[in-house]
Image (cartoon, rainbow, N blue to C red):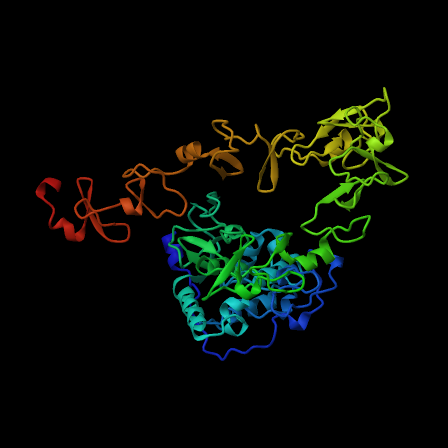
């Protein structure tokens, strides 16, 4: 692997010296593009004047159908210039071959081999799902405002300018890199992400911010935070882990949830588990500042009381006024009421926590109707009281008429037929609806009627998600996947990892190691017996099975030689 790693030519960058130009909001030229999340509910993208989201649907830029042709190149977004660039860049080669991007390799077949190793929906072909996904990830992973000060609206004074520029210099010096590929790996090795073997003859990705022992499947070269494929293999390294530009920046500076910019200096506030510039914690609808004011959180966004009442609050069926956050919302017969408005039509007493029923669509307390509230039982669905000796169906603490005991999905009467109650949300499903919607165990293909284990988008019975060797349940244990099989940590380490003969600990993915004498050692454990200096990257001498660095060999006592 070391020879193959040394033969790879990696990208090298410097900060751009070109004059930065501001051409207005990043997507001003493509207003009207559709939202992929809201679809027809959004009239088309319209840029907010300071938030990086759509005015019409409030979704961020990258959830819209971003046209690849309107995006600048990644290194231009990063405001970088390449040291010793090639005559033909990967982007020029990509245009010739019908892609949005290809890896930088000498031969076209090598790029095609890399593309075949990606999931089909991630292949950045022009006018394809993968090409469109790359465009959205480019906007998301490399936020323009993080790298081009002309787009960082909150960087307004000398102190924030200095912090912005210092951070930019550090990331180029210490973290930024572009993955390169080895088109046909000659030594089987474990992927640093999934720990499964990368077969001889297949494509592997390497990175110059990591040593030669770190190798990835092309589909495993991902951001460690959200698991998304790194766009154009542009990565940022920190603590021996891969990050996209967005999440790398957030390691060092908080990001304002309002404007999507990093907060370089100054005060900020924390609300709803997020961080905000002081003047950006605003109502999601009208932009009124909410710092030190009362607000309501809806779908993880803040709303002022006025907007909540006008747009979101339910309206009382009697007075037609909004039921504000300070009022109790009573929901009866599919209608909403203020607690002060729901009163008996006969005696005018409030009906909250009272027994009542509707007579000619007007609420009447049972005392006015002459019904003993201690003996009366009503149907949970229709709220009508049962007649003497009328058949009831009990479910939980409630009772239903047979015609009112309905499947939560198809709304057909269940009656006394077989049904299933969903523990998560309490829904009751008839057998047909349950069979249609039930999860299927990936291992045994049986219907899952009890608790479900989810992993990599697949569902398992609790007793099917077990270690391949010892059959121990894995739902509450650390586990590993190898060749599509699952192993508990104990079995995986015992059977699939090398054990360092010095410290007797297992050598895991990402650990530096060296092979010598038919055994595999941690690099930190492969030491000179005299000075304990590491020998992995230097020359050494062996005498009687003992290792000496060249300096210590001359100083070693004869008893050690």
Q: Is 53 placed left or right of 432 in the picture?
A: left
User: Residue 436 location, x and y as percent?
Assistant: 74, 35
User: Residue 477 location, x and y as percent?
Assistant: 48, 34
Tally the marks.
Answer: 0
User: Residue 430 location, x and y as percent?
Assistant: 77, 30
- Residue in the foreground of this view, choosing between 217 and 277: 277
Q: Is residue 75 visible?
A: yes
Residue at 68% x, 70% y is 30
Q: Is 202 placed left or right of 65 in the picture?
A: left
Q: Is 21 placed left or right of 303 in the picture?
A: left
User: Residue 72 location, x and y as percent?
Assistant: 57, 70
Q: Is 491 placed left or right of 275 in the picture?
A: left
The answer to whether 472 is drawn above or below residue 526 in the figure is above
Farthest left residue?
Answer: 558
Please tell me in which quadrant of the rendered image residue 309 appears: bottom right
The answer to whether 441 is drawn above or below residue 50 in the figure is above
- Residue in the foreground of this view, choosing between 136 and 415: 415
Residue at 55% x, 53% y is 228
- Residue in the foreground of this view, choosing between 398 and 21: 398
Q: Is residue 417 visible?
A: no
Farthest front residue?
Answer: 347
| Quarter of the rendering occupied by the C terminus | top left
Residue at 17% x, 40% y is 544
Farthest right residue?
Answer: 360
Farthest bottom residue?
Answer: 19
- Residue in the foreground of this view, choosing between 543 and 420: 420
The answer to whether 143 is drawn above or below residue 542 in the figure is below
Please tell me in which quadrant of the rendered image residue 206 appears: bottom left
């Amino acid at each position: 692997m070391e020879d193959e790693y040394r033969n790879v030519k990696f990208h090298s960058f410097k900060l751009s010296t070109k004059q930065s130009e501001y051409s207005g909001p990043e997507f001003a030229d493509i207003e009207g593009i559709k939202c992929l999340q809201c679809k027809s509910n959004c009239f088309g993208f319209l840029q907010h004047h300071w938030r990086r989201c759509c005015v019409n649907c409030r979704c961020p830029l990258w959830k819209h159908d971003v046209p690849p042709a309107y995006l600048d190149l990644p290194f231009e977004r990063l405001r970088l210039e390449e040291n010793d660039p090639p005559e033909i860049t990967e982007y020029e080669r990509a245009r010739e071959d019908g892609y949005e991007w290809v890896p930088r390799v000498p031969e076209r077949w090598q790029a095609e081999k890399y593309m075949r190793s990606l999931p089909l929906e991630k292949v950045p072909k022009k006018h394809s799902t993968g090409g469109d996904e790359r465009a959205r990830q480019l906007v998301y992973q490399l936020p323009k405002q993080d790298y081009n000060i002309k787009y960082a609206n909150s960087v307004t004074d000398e102190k924030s300018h200095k912090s912005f520029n210092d951070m930019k210099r550090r990331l180029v010096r210490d973290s930024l890199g572009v993955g390169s590929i080895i088109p046909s790996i000659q030594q089987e090795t474990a992927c640093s992400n999934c720990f499964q073997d990368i077969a001889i003859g297949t494509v592997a990705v390497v990175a110059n911010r990591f040593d030669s022992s770190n190798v990835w499947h092309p589909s495993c070269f991902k951001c460690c935070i959200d698991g998304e494929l790194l766009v154009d293999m542009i990565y940022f390294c920190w603590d021996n882990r891969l990050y996209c530009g967005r999440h790398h920046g957030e390691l060092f500076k908080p990001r304002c949830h309002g404007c999507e910019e990093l907060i370089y200096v100054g005060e900020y506030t924390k609300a709803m588990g997020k961080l905000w510039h002081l003047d950006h914690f605003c109502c999601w609808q009208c932009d009124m500042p909410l710092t030190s004011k009362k607000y309501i959180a809806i779908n993880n966004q803040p709303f002022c009381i006025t907007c909540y009442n006008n747009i979101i609050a339910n309206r009382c069926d009697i007075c037609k006024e909004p039921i504000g956050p300070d009022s109790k919302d009573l929901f009866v017969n599919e209608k909403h009421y203020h607690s002060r408005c729901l009163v008996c039509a006969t005696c005018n007493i409030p009906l909250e926590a009272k027994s009542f029923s509707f007579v000619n669509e007007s609420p009447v307390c049972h005392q006015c109707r002459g019904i003993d509230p201690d003996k009366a039982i009503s149907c949970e669905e229709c709220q009508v009281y049962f007649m003497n000796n009328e058949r009831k169906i009990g479910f939980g603490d409630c009772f239903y008429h047979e015609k009112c005991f309905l499947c939560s999905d198809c709304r057909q009467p269940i009656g006394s037929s077989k049904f299933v109650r969903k523990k998560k949300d309490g829904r009751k499903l008839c057998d047909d609806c349950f069979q249609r919607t039930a999860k299927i165990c990936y291992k045994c293909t049986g219907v899952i009627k009890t608790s479900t284990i989810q992993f990599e988008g697949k569902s398992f019975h609790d007793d099917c998600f077990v270690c391949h060797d010892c059959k121990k349940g894995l739902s509450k244990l650390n586990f590993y996947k190898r060749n599509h099989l699952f192993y508990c940590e104990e079995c995986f380490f015992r059977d699939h990892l090398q054990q360092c003969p010095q410290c007797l600990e297992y050598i895991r993915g990402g650990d530096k190691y060296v092979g010598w004498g038919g055994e595999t050692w941690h690099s930190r454990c492969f030491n000179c017996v005299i000075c304990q200096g590491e020998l992995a990257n230097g020359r050494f001498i062996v005498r009687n099975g003992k290792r000496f660095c060249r300096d210590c060999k001359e100083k070693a006592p004869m008893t050690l030689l």
